[in-house]
Amino acid sequence: GFLLVTSPARAAVTEALYFERKTRDELNLPLCGFVLNRSLAAGRDRALPDLQAVPAGALREGLRKLLPMARIEQETVDGHAALADELAQRSGPDGLCAVLPSLVHGASGLEDLVALADVLSGGPA
């Protein structure tokens, strides 16, 4: 079988799905699943702050100014989560769909690689 790794970028997903089809149809290898790399889907359970619940003052004003950017990020998170759900469905009931976080500094160091291994093995994100 084979496992495909993709990022949430539309071009990368299109390429991964192309390879899925070609590998399955031409080599007769079953799809074992997907790894969605550099994803914000792990934040799908985070809620935007309720400004009415924050006492009036500098904190509320600061949140009010940041909320438009937070909404844009939340749309990205929602899109990544929907993609992860789609890839999980394509993987089938016995397939894998792992979601790796987007790391600020990439995964070039040992600590970063250990953190990604933890995520893949079901450990902390």
Image (cartoon, helix red, strand yellow):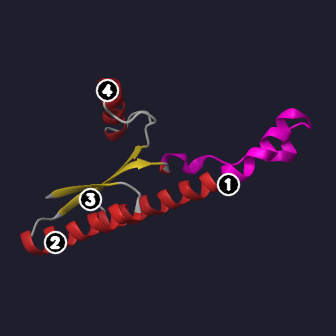
53 relative position to 35: left or right: right
Instruction: Determine whether the residue tagged by mark 2 lies in a helix, strand or loop.
Output: helix
The image shows residue 63, relative to residue 9, as above or below, that is: above
Q: Which residue is mark 2?
A: 22
Front position in the image: 102 or 93: 102
Kind of residue at disc 3: Asp
Give how far across and how far down residue 98 sits, in percent. Answer: 35, 49
Q: Is residue 9 shown above or below 62? A: below
Which quadrant would residue 110 be assigned to in this image? Answer: top left
Which numbered disc covers residue 109? 4
Q: Find out whether the residues at labels 4 and 1 contact each other: C-beta distance under 8 Å.
A: no
Measuring 42% from the left and 58% from the top, which residue is drawn there? 84
Check disc 4: other Cα within 10 Å, few if <14, some if 14-19, many if 20+.
few
Marks 3/1: CA distance?
A: 34 Å
Instruction: Tell me which label, 4 or 1, sits earlier in the chain.
Output: 1
Q: Main secondary structure of the magenta part?
A: helix
Q: Which comes before the other along the chain, label 2 or label 3?
A: 2
Q: Which residue is mark 1?
A: 71
Q: Residues within 10 Å of mark 1 (few under 14, many from 20)?
A: few
Q: Which mark is residue 25?
A: none
Kind of residue at disc 1: Arg
Image location of residue 62, percent across then percent down: 80, 39
Label 3, residues with CA under 10 Å away: few <14, some 14-19, many ≥20: few
Q: Is residue 44 left or right of residue 112?
A: right
Q: Is residue 70 magenta?
A: yes
- How far apart in space, not on screen, are marks 1 and 2 (Cα)? 38 Å
Residue position marked by numbered label 3 in the rendering: 94
User: What segment is highlighted magenta in the picture?
Assistant: 42-71
